[in-house]
C-alpha cells in the first residue's frame, strides 16, 4: 500500500510516532538508545531537529530537512530499526510481523504534517512542549526532562514560566 506523503523538498514536518503497545514506557526506559540512534541517523542523513518531546509510548518532533531533500521515510525507518535492535526482545510479535522479520515495537505508520508557515510552526512547537502536561506525565512542561523546551529556555527563546499560564496570551498551547 502506498501512503500519500508530502514530497516537498527542504520543508519542515511535524511527526507523531507511536509504539505498538501504548501502555509501554520503552521510549523513556531506553531514552539513551533512542538519542544515540537518532544522532547516528542525523549524521548519515542530516536534518535539523526544531522541537521534540519523548513520552513513554510516543514521541512528537519537528524536523527541517535540507534543501532538495524530502526523504524523511528513510530517516524514520533507520531510527525505528536502530532503536528496535538496541532494546531486548520481550514484546509480543504477531505472526504477520514475524513473516516480515519485524519486531512488535513500533506502529508501522506515523503521522506527518508539513508545516505551512510561521504560525503553524509555533502552534506545533507549543503542542510538543505542552504534551507531557496534556498526557498527565507532568504538572508543568518544564518538569518533563525529555523535551526540547529546556533548550528553548537555555537559549532564551522561551521563559522558564512557559506553559504555566503566567504572561501567556493566546490559545491553548497548540491545541487550537
Image (cartoon, rainbow, N blue to C red):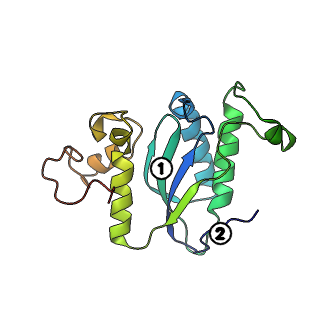
Q: Residue at x 62, y 61 (%)?
A: 72
Q: Residues within 10 Å of mark 1 (few under 14, many from 20)?
A: many
Element type where label 1 sits in the image:
strand
Q: Residue at x 37, y 33 (%)?
A: 137
Element type where label 2 sits in the image:
loop
Residue 43: % across, % down:
60, 53
Q: Residue at x 64, y 55 (%)?
A: 75
The quarter of the rendered structure image containing the C terminus is: bottom left
Observer-nearest of 52 and 46 = 52
Residue 81 visible in image:
yes
Q: What is the number of the mark on residue 4? A: 2
Residue 44: % across, % down:
65, 55
Residue that mark 1 sits on: 60
The quarter of the rendered structure image containing the N terminus is: bottom right
The residue sitting at the left extreme is 167
In which quadrant of the rendered view does residue 10 lie?
A: bottom right
Q: What is the number of the mark on residue 156? A: none
Amino acid at each position: 500500500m502506498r501512503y500519500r506523503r508530502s514530497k516537498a523538498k527542504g520543508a519542515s514536518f511535524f511527526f507523531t510516532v507511536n509504539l505498538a503497545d501504548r501502555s509501554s514506557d520503552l521510549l523513556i526506559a531506553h531514552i539513551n538508545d533512542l538519542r544515540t540512534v537518532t544522532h547516528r541517523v542525523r549524521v548519515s542523513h542530516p536534518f535539523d531537529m526544531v522541537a521534540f518531546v519523548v513520552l513513554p509510548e510516543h514521541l512528537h518532533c519537528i524536523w527541517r530537512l535540507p534543501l532538495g531533500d524530502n526523504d524523511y521515510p528513510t530517516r524514520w525507518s533507520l531510527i525505528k530499526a536502530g532503536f528496535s535492535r538496541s532494546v531486548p526482545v520481550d514484546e509480543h510479535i504477531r505472526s504477520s510481523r514475524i513473516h516480515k522479520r519485524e519486531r512488535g515495537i513500533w506502529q508501522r505508520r506515523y503521522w506527518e504534517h508539513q508545516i505551512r508557515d510561521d504560525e503553524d510552526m509555533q502552534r506545533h512547537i507549543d503542542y510538543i512542549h505542552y504534551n507531557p502536561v496534556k498526557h498527565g506525565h507532568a504538572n508543568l512542561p518544564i518538569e518533563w526532562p525529555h523535551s526540547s523546551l529546556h533548550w528553548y529556555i537555555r537559549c532564551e527563546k522561551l521563559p522558564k514560566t512557559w506553559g504555566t499560564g503566567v504572561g501567556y496570551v493566546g490559545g491553548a498551547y497548540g491545541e487550537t
